[in-house]
Amino acid sequence: MVPLSYYLLLSGILFVCGVLGFLIKRNIITIFMSIELMLNGVNLSFVAFAAHWHALSGQVFVFFVMVVAAAEAAVGLAIIIAVYRTRETLNVDQVNLLKL
Amino acid sequence: MFHLILFLFFGAICVAGAVNLLVQSHPINSALSLIAVMASLAAEYLLLGAEFVAAVQVIVYAGAIMVLFVITIMLLNAGKEERSKGSRVAILLGVPGVLIGAVLVAWTLLQRSNMQAAVPIGALPGDPADIARLLFHNFLLPFEVTSVLILIAIMGAVVLASRPEAVARGARKDEG
């Protein structure tokens, strides 16, 4: 038997890696992948709690998170393509039209 | 014991992939290590007895979403990431803040480490029939709302990714 906290720790590590990637990386696609990593970390804790409390609703919620992630990936990548078409760059520091 | 070994093995792959995503400078390498993370997460879901979620994880995440990412990287011909002077504040405040938060969460979790994610190996409580019963009875309204969400996302993706002049031409055709 694996303690619940191990699963939650793994989920936390994945989430922290996602946050760090979001802060450190400068490529817009890699930043987007870090967001997916965070979503995956949260999904793992959903499934772990579902197993712990013997409640299947947690797994249904993972299903909904996946749907939202898929919609977000489709729209986000379309936005990235639109940004690349107008700015000719994938570096977030050069997409600074709204900056003071 | 066997359960713990499997957990540690796939967990190590997960963490290694996540760290590799941060270290690599080429986006395609990051994407491939993210696929490794997602595949080993599917194995972790199987260890927790979530059979259906594991299958969906492989099909939707490691399959569909990552194919979308890889195709975008190849379409935009994304090269090595340039190291530019980003916001210093984000790194100076953000990284220590994140690490302190992570240590706090880990410490809190380990204080309560007697809770078990009690699924014997080979038991699969999350089989598709039970999930479907829950999804189509208790969660019917959210399920239908997500279908509308997917539809809107598809239309948004098509509008955003199509060339602006093509959209304008389509509008003119509608008027005329």
Image (cartoon, coloured by chain):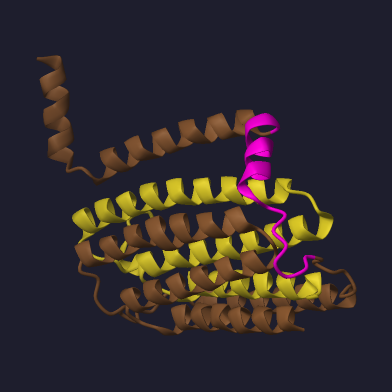
Chain colours: A yellow, B brown
Q: In the image, residue B166 lies at what x, y percent?
A: 13, 36
Vertical placement of residue A46 versus B95, above or below: above
Q: Is residue A23 visible?
A: no
The C terminus of chain A: image quadrant? bottom left
Where does the image place residue B121, in percent across and percent down from the top left? Answer: 73, 70
**Nearest the eye: B129 or B81:** B129
Report if residue B134 lies within the magenta region. Answer: yes
Give A66 or B157, whichever is nearer the viewer. Answer: A66
Q: Is residue B53 left or right of residue B110?
A: left
Q: Quadrant of residue B47?
A: bottom right
Q: Is residue B133 magenta?
A: yes
The residue shown at (59%, 53%) is: B52
User: Measuring 71% from the left and 32% from the top, which residue is drawn there?
Assistant: B138
Looking at the image, residue A17 lies above or below residue A33: below
Q: Residue at x 34, y 54 (%)?
A: A77
Position of the N terminus of chain A by quadrant: bottom right
Q: Residue furthest top?
A: B176
Answer above or below: position of B46 versus A62: below
Is B126 in front, or is A21?
B126
Residue A84: quadrant of the picture: bottom left
Residue situated in front as seen by the camera: B116 or B103: B116
- Left or right, residue B3 beside residue A54: left
- Name the spot of residue B110 as percent of width and height, x first: 84, 78
| Rendered location of residue A62, percent (x, y) | 62, 51
Q: Is residue A8 visible?
A: yes
Question: In the figure, B57 relative to B35: above or below?
Answer: above
Q: How many marks?
A: 0
Q: Is residue B85 left or right of residue B9?
A: left
Magenta range is B119-138
